[in-house]
Image (cartoon, grey):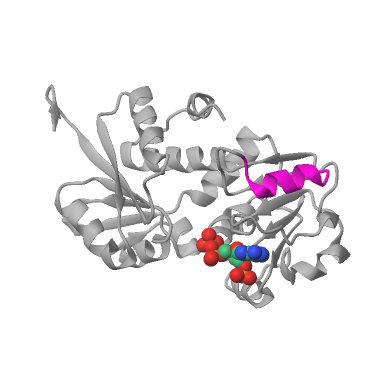
Amino acid sequence: MERGDRKTDRYAVVGHPVRHSRSPMIHQLFARQTGQNISYETIDASAAEFEVAVRGFGAAGGKGLNITLPHKERAFELATDCSAPASRACAVNTLTFKTGGVIRGDNTDGSGFLRDITVNQGQDVGGKRVLIFGAGGATRGILAPLLDAQPASIVLANRTVERAAALIGQFASPDELSSCALADLPELGPFDIVVNATSAGVRGENLPFPESCLASTSFCYDLAYGLGGTPFVTWARDHGAGAAVQGWGMLVEQAAESFQIWRGVRPETQPILAKMNL
Ligand code: ATR
């Protein structure tokens, strides 16, 4: 599509399901704010359809893709060249089609998370005791940037403790990183920052987390988000946490970083967050 003599560059998000993704709206707002001429679509592709969808988009002249669940690991394998954050997470949420058939993989989830916590939420991670519930792909994505922020310690607590132990083993196990079972948490007392990276509670079941993790000074962050709030945020507030927020800011910040990778300009995120009226 041509508008005047400026070509419209095509972008999209690939996921399954993806219909309710907020990424098209966010990227269109970024484009308007920065004067960039882009289009942004959603592509629903199952695991079996993923590779054809990605290669087809690139072959048709598409410039870049965001990758969401459940394809981030597969996108990492498909990329011909990856950034350090993508390699550390073994997952990619941003693909860029370059000349010569190069497909560059980046991961902006971790830096988006850290930026939301530190800049938007004003939390200082340095020297803090951090607890993360969960040991799946979401945890893997945020672990390296969190470690870089030099907390006093990070505990990964997971329903399946072996999975948490295996994950920290892949991070060369620095002293400040440890794993435990949810049942062991009461021995560890309250934490400064508590992050939910599990899918617990989304099916309406009670959260299996001990309230001993929380104090009135605890800052709680849910990587998940939803219009009616999330079970974790409700749980944290009900059990006396000082503050509890959903992951809307992470969503917008990781998108801003993808936009910067593609367009070379970083949009301002505050007006977008305000417009989302959360
Ligand atoms: P993602 O890639 O989004 O992290 P995942 O790899 O399926 O998704 O991981 C989901 C996480 O939520 C896991 O840590 C999982 O715990 P297990 O490793 O024990 O499966 C956790 N989880 C999901 N449902 C849960 C529940 N009802 N109670 C506690 N933890 C739960």
Q: Give the range drawn in magenta.
A: 229-240
Left or right: residue 240 versus residue 47 is right
**Spot occupied by residue 55 in the image (x, y as percentages of width and height):** 21, 59
- For ligand 1, the image quadrant comes to bottom right
> At 83% across and 42% down in the image, what residue appears?
217
Foreground pick, 101 / 218: 218
Q: Is residue 218 above or below residue 166?
A: above
| Residue 72, horizontal then vertical, whole percent | 41, 60
Nearest the viewer among 131 and 248 is 248
Q: Does residue 135 appear anywhere in the picture?
A: no
- Residue 119: horizontal and vertical position, in percent? 61, 35
Query: In the rendered image of this protein, does residue 201 appear above or below residue 135?
Result: above
Residue depicted at x 67% and y 52%: 195
Query: Is residue 166 something one can see in this rendering?
Result: yes
Q: Is residue 97 left or right of residue 259?
A: left
* Residue drawn at 63 percent across, 48 percent down: 222
> Residue 145: percent from the left, percent from the top?
58, 53
Left/right of residue 135 with respect to residue 210 in the rendered view: left
Image quadrant assignment for residue 71: bottom left
